[in-house]
């Protein structure tokens, strides 16, 4: 294994660790700021909330689309 291989391997490990930390942060952020509603659950409001998360770069476009499609299937 060359020095370059080690650098690439360490970078990949660091990237995975960063992704895990960000995923945990996103989950905490969602729970804290956008608790799921009960009773008068509004799908439109939930989509708007998740669109805001996307606009703030908290979630990716792919995550937003998955959430939106899941909510729309409840209609």
Image: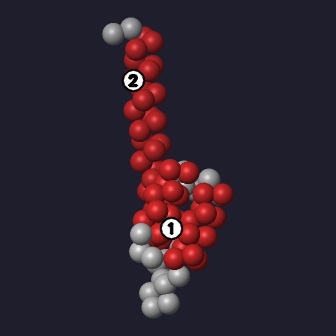
Identify the residue shown where x is 45% and y is 12%: 4
The picture places residue 25, in percent across and down from the top left corner, at 49, 58
Query: 10 or 49: which is nearer to us?
Result: 49
**Outermost residue, left direction?**
1
The picture places residue 64, in percent across and down from the top left corner, at 53, 58
Which numbered dot is residue 9?
2
Upstream in sequence: badge 2 or badge 1: 2
Q: Quadrant of the N terminus?
A: top left
Identify the residue shown where x is 50% and y is 50%: 62
Crowd rating for badge 1 (residues with CA inside 10 Å; few <14, some 14–19, many 20+):
some
Contact between labelled residues 1 and 2, with CB atoms less than 8 Å apart: no
Quarter of the image where one finds residue 39? bottom left
- In space, the residues marked 2 and 1 are separated at their CA atoms by 32 Å
Residue 34 visible, this angle: yes
Identify the residue shown where x is 57% and y is 75%: 44
Q: Which residue is mark 1?
A: 30
Quarter of the image where one finds residue 55? bottom right
Q: Secondary structure at mark 1?
A: helix
Residue 25 visible, this angle: no
Q: Is residue 14 above or below residue 19?
A: above
Q: Is residue 12 left or right of residue 44?
A: left
Identify the residue shown where x is 41% and y is 74%: 74
Q: Secondary structure at mark 2?
A: helix
Q: Quadrant of the C terminus?
A: bottom left
Crowd rating for badge 2 (residues with CA inside 10 Å; few <14, some 14–19, many 20+):
few
The picture places residue 11, in percent across and down from the top left corner, at 46, 27
């Amino acid at each position: 294994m060359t020095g370059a291989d080690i650098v690439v391997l360490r970078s990949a490990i660091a990237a995975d660790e960063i992704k895990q930390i960000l995923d945990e942060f996103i989950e905490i952020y969602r729970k804290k700021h956008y608790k799921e509603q009960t009773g008068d659950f509004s799908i439109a409001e939930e989509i708007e909330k998740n669109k805001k998360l996307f606009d703030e770069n908290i979630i990716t476009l792919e995550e937003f689309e998955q959430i939106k499609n899941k909510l729309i299937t409840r209609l």
